[in-house]
Amino acid sequence: APDLAPETYAARVASSCREFLDVIERALRSDADADDDADADDDARGIAGGGVYVGIAGIGMMYYKLALVQRAMQGDARGNDPKRAVFGRTTGAMLRAALTHCERGRKRFEVEEEARRRRHPRTTFLEGVAGCHALEAAVLTELGADDAARDRVRRLVGLEPAAAS
């Protein structure tokens, strides 16, 4: 079918991703502009809690994965030429957005998990703070911030004593 030809399909996917990111960014901006209470906004939008697959940190994971896909499509290690931005944003911009959303999720999880840890100690790889540290380390590595990435890995490893054995 003509609509599944590689060029047509790639163009349609890229266009759909650009539209999807525009919708997400408008929603996040409008909620932030309407109310200074970001945590309440996250609750209202259903993006609070979870790990790096759902919630505000999940939005960070989405940006991270799209940045890697775009970088691979461009064949460019840096991927910061706006004229080659397949998804309408440079790879660097998507990586920075990934880090911003993941850090925001982690900060919220840290507060929630401290209370939960007292009642039921557990640490998992891709939930809450641990997942955010892992994702932040990956994003920071892609951004070339190796010292900061190593710091996130140290924080992740530091959670090990709290993990159920």
Image (cartoon, grey):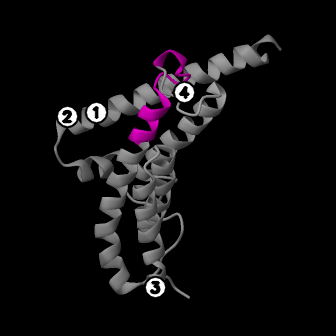
Residue pointed to by mark 4: 17
Residue pointed to by mark 1: 29
Q: Vertical placement of 116 versus 4: above or below?
A: below
| Amino acid identity at mark 3 | Pro
Q: Which residues are magenta?
A: 82-97
Q: CA distance from mark 3 to mark 4?
A: 40 Å
Q: Report if the CB atoms under discs 1 and 2 are less than 8 Å apart.
A: yes
- Label 4 Cα crowd, 10 Å radius (few <14 / some 14-19 / many 20+): some
Q: CA distance from mark 4 to mark 2?
A: 24 Å
Q: Earlier in the sequence, mark 4 or mark 1?
A: 4
Between marks 3 and 4 in the image, the one whose residue lies nearer the viewer = 3
Residue 58 visible in rendering: no
| Amino acid identity at mark 2 | Asp
Please identify the quadrant where the C terminus is shown: bottom right
Q: Earlier in the sequence, mark 1 or mark 3?
A: 1
Q: Callout 2: helix, strand or loop?
A: helix
Residue pointed to by mark 3: 161
Residue pointed to by mark 2: 33
> Could you say which is closer to the camera, residue 44 or residue 155?
155
Q: Vertical placement of 120 versus 72: above or below?
A: below
Q: Is residue 159 magenta?
A: no
- Label 3 Cα crowd, 10 Å radius (few <14 / some 14-19 / many 20+): few
- Label 2 Cα crowd, 10 Å radius (few <14 / some 14-19 / many 20+): few
Residue 29 visible in rendering: yes
Q: CA distance from mark 1 to mark 2?
A: 6 Å
- The answer to whether 38 appears left or right of 91 in the picture is left
Measuring from the top left, give residue 79's x and y in whole percent: 53, 29
Between marks 2 and 3 in the image, the one whose residue lies nearer the viewer = 3
Q: CA distance from mark 4 to mark 1?
A: 18 Å
- Quarter where residue 21 is shown: top left
